[in-house]
Amino acid sequence: MNINVDELISNLTSQTQELINTLGTDQPLMIGIYTGGIWIAEHLHASLKLEKPMGILDISFYRDDFSQIGLNPQVKPSKIPLDITDEHIILVDDVLHTGRTVRAALNELFDYGRPASVHLAVLIDRGERELPIDAQVAGKRIDLPPHQHVKLTGPKPLKLEVITAI
């Protein structure tokens, strides 16, 4: 499967601008989920000319699968540049699959305050949710068999790979 990342980011940027136009604010707070979500958020933040500094979430301590994958030794600090109370937030991730990463991100976000709204933007929505979470904007929605996964590598260049699990 050949996926043009630049085309997806362009599509995601257009959809995100349309979303911003409906929010009642022209300056939402954009927050990327470590790592791939940050790479995508950086592109969106620059393209949309957002003035508020971008936030970064590392959800490692909020994951629900420690017993399966262990603690991530590459834990980075989250950086939320301002109080999120009453802010309209655009949460950005690279791939939405089960919804568990987004659930962890929401749990962490609410530790920082109570936003006015949280909207999800993803580069790829591949379906197969385990939780009732949906992206408001997606660069592309694809269907893959359960044994295949999408991985974003980067940051330069950004490249999407479909990986088949053995």
Image (cartoon, rainbow, N blue to C red):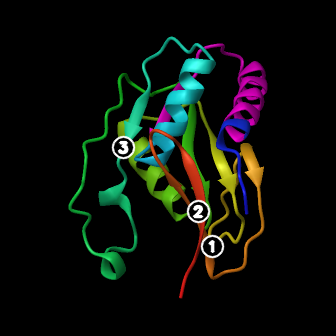
Q: Main secondary structure of the magenta part?
A: helix
Q: Which residue is mark 1?
A: 130
Q: Which residue is mark 2?
A: 99
Q: Residue at x 37, y 53 (%)?
A: 59
Q: Which image quarter is the N terminus in? A: bottom right
Q: Amino acid at mark 2?
A: Gly
Q: Amino acid at mark 1?
A: Glu
Asked if the residue at tag 3 contacts the one at tag 1, i.e. Cβ–Cβ closer than 8 Å, the answer is no
Q: Return the residue nearer the eye: 20 or 36.
A: 36
Q: Residue at x 70, y 45 (%)?
A: 4
Is 13 covered by the magenta stretch?
yes
Bounds of the magenta segment: 8-32
Real-space Cα distance between discs 1 and 3?
23 Å
User: Would residue 88 be seen by someone viewing this image from the given angle?
Assistant: no
Q: Residue furthest left?
A: 73
The crowding category of the residue bearing disc 3, from other C-alpha atoms within 10 Å (few below 14, some 14 to 19, many at least 20), is few
> How many labels, in total?
3
Real-space Cα distance between discs 2 and 1?
6 Å
